[in-house]
Amino acid sequence: MNWTEIDIYTTTEGIDPVCGCLLRIGITGFEIRDSKDLEDFLNDKTANWDYIDDDLMELKNCETCVTVYVAENEQGAETAAMIRSEMKALKRRDEEDRFGRLAVEMSGVREEDWANNWKQYFKPIRIGEKLLIKPSWEEPVDSTTRTILEIDPASSFGTGQHDTTKLCLEFVERFVKKDARQLDVGCGSGILSIAGILLGAKEAYAVDTDENSTNIAAENAAKNDIKPDIYRTFCGNIIDDEALRKKLSENGKFDIITANIVADVLIAMSPIFGGFLADDGIIIISGIILERCDEVMNSFYDKGYKLIELRESEGWAAAVFRR
């Protein structure tokens, strides 16, 4: 198997937050290069050494960097998109600019070229009993009677290849009802809410903290002939943006909420979802690494939600709760 190197440029202070983000999306192995490590080593008066290798001395003036490796396949492409999304979110939270650039570079691939380099891995995929997900540059795999959802990820997470997205889409297919209203939190490419519309929902609101993602979601909705009057996008964080919460609620409650994010954010949002959800409404959550599944589940139990179903795939979990 071939691998792609992904470098994340940060500061000494940013190492822990960056690594925390990587752990939340299931990445447990990474390399760290930090000039402060060499400085601490040189200042250690108890160390016994009389020679320092040239490779080690290169650390002296290096920019702090966290490096991970992802497979050159569809899962690796989705993981790369998740990393980029996490770093953009961390950068927005870093109001004092303590964590550096948080730039994500892949083996010398330029920002504007990265999506094209991964196109080879985005192929049509059947999900559940009704959906066929395909990028615009691929033809359908057959003359299927499935509902075709065309998605171009650009730099946003969500093509249907990753286990978290697959689990969510399978649940959306089962639980979305005709004429339902859907709220998609952390929409990424918009795949979950676009699927909801194509499967019968009458209206969907897609929310993300990344403006690039909301723009991509709107573009993907248009590719699927979904009109902007029934598919609205919003940029912001519902946890701390009261004005956004009011805007989302002004036309009534939602019959189904989808949130494919990470454990910490799902826990933080668990007290907020109830303000958006209609009586007997459904919440579909995913993006949960198995090690934190119980913690996330308990946060929803504590808010009075009833678990309808919990599914696992390749180290990830997704759940459906009813109000």
Image (cartoon, rainbow, N blue to C red):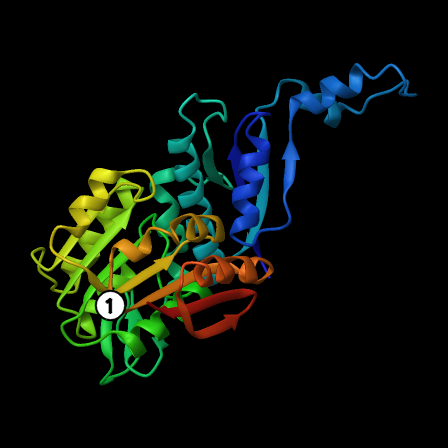
Which quadrant holds the C terminus? bottom left
Q: Quadrant of the N terminus?
A: bottom right
Query: What residue is shown at x 34% (from left), y 47% (from top)?
Result: 155
Residue 162 horizontal side relative to residue 132, left or right:
right
Q: Is residue 294 above or below residue 90?
A: below
Q: Which image quarter: residue 223?
A: bottom left
The residue positioned 24% from the left and 67% from the top of the image is 279
Residue 206, percent from left and from top: 23, 54
| Residue 246 lies in quadrant | top left
Q: Which residue is mark 1?
A: 279
Residue 265 rendering spot, x and y as whole percentages: 43, 48
User: Closer to the camera, 322 or 142?
Assistant: 322
- Rendered view: 216 above or below 307: above
**Count of marks overlaid on the render:** 1
Q: Looking at numbered disc 1 in the image, what kind of residue is underneath it?
A: Asp
Estimate the x, y position of residue 154 in percent, counting from the top left.
31, 50
Q: Between residue 322 and residue 165, name the one nearer to us.
A: 322
| Vertical comparison of 96 with 168: above or below | above
Q: Position of residue 250 (x, y in %)?
A: 12, 50
